[in-house]
Image (cartoon, rainbow, N blue to C red):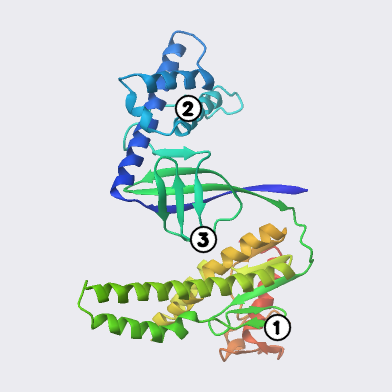
Amino acid sequence: MNKTIRKAFKFRLKVSTETNQKLANYAGGCRFVWNKALALNLDRLNKKQPILRYDALDFWSKLWKQSDEYGFLKDLPSQVLQQKLMDLDKAFKDAFDKNQPFKRIPVFKRKGQSVDSIRYPQGFKIDQPANKVFLPKIGWVRYRNSRKIVGTPKNMTVSRKGKYWYISIQVEYETPEMSHKSTSAIGIDMGVKRFVTLSDGTFIEPLNSFKKSAEKLTTLQRKLKHKKKFSKNWHKQKAKITKHHEKIAAARRDFLHKKSTAICENQAVICIEDLKIKNMSKAAKLKNVKQKSGLNKAILDQGWGMFFDMLTYKQDWNGGMVIKVPPHHTSQKCPSCHHIAKENRLTQAEFVCVECGYKNNADVVGAVNVLTRGLSGASL
Ligand SMILES: [Zn+2]
């Protein structure tokens, strides 16, 4: 049995003044049509007449579009207005649904008070390598990328929050329900010296793409300093630096993809510490350590968050699962006798239980504890 997963990816758009104006006009047009159709139906309700459903409302909106008075609606893509009317139709339907007692009759949308949104059911495109989306009647708009979009895009919604515009891409993908070809489970310990340590004792060295390339970056930046600001050569040098940054990012992404794919193909269940908490506790522990900034840089450089995202969606694809566990004491607990003590961890690298004498690499012990905790159901 396959199950269909629906998921949304949301990014902030980088809009030009012109695009900003267009989107504001579209949002205004959507509000107008919503309010006009709503007023029509409220009036009918008042007169005890049946409300107009979508088809009738769509007919009306086409008339408004052709009128001189509301001719500004012509600038908007038809599908955007139709989506708004469908939303209104659904809102009315829900309001009269006895199974949804908390739904109320829809209300008027006011500028700046209600969320402005513009939904495209079709005609949009995504160019992932370039981080841009194509919006009908607007063109290509770039977005701030934070993760890879997976699945089949079903629709796109542009919405405004504060002074920014966001794009939300709804995707759908089929995944076999826990049908991973493997039946094994593994625990993962994330680290700085060893990027990943698995509970079976194997580990992955960090790529440290930044470290390797930092020297080159410094050279490039030093050269930039010697150029006259905003001169032709300065711009050229600046472009070189940007390109170098992109190269580093691409190498890191490639590394994370390869490693996450390998783990996901072999393991039906992956147990991993909750990274947010782990990062926080690491940062707290390191408060007095001089190299704190260096370590944080190392963590960022290795892309823990990105790696975790990849593991999660690849497991979804493969029909496996990822279990997040609370990280407390995973590095201090003895896997053999379960004794918890700071003293079990006298050095960074080695674990020696003060109670029973069990010995192992400290990261492997961490990974084993994560696995045990995940499988025992102690997930977040
Ligand atoms: Zn022990």
Mark sitting on residue 132 = none
Pointer 2: what residue?
A: 85
Q: Earlier in the sequence, mark 3 or mark 1?
A: 3
Q: Position of residue 274 (x, y in %)?
A: 57, 67
Mark 1 to mark 2 CA distance (whole Å):
58 Å
Image vertical order of residue 244 relative to residue 348, above or below: above
Q: Residue at x 44, y 76 (%)?
A: 283
Q: Residue 366's image quarter?
A: bottom right
Residue 366 visible? yes
Pointer 1: what residue?
A: 201
Q: Residue at x 45, y 26 (%)?
A: 106
* Residue 204 in the figure: left or right of residue 286: right
Crowd tier of the residue under label 3, counting other residues whose Cα lies within 10 Å: few below 14, some 14–19, many 20 or above = some
Mark 3 to mark 1 CA distance (whole Å):
30 Å
Q: SS class of the residue under badge 3? A: loop
Q: Residue 255's image quarter?
A: bottom right
The one of 250 and 194 positioned closer to us in this rendering: 250
Mark 2 to mark 3 CA distance (whole Å):
32 Å
Q: Residue at x 39, y 43 (%)?
A: 138
Residue 291 visible? no
Pointer 3: what residue?
A: 147
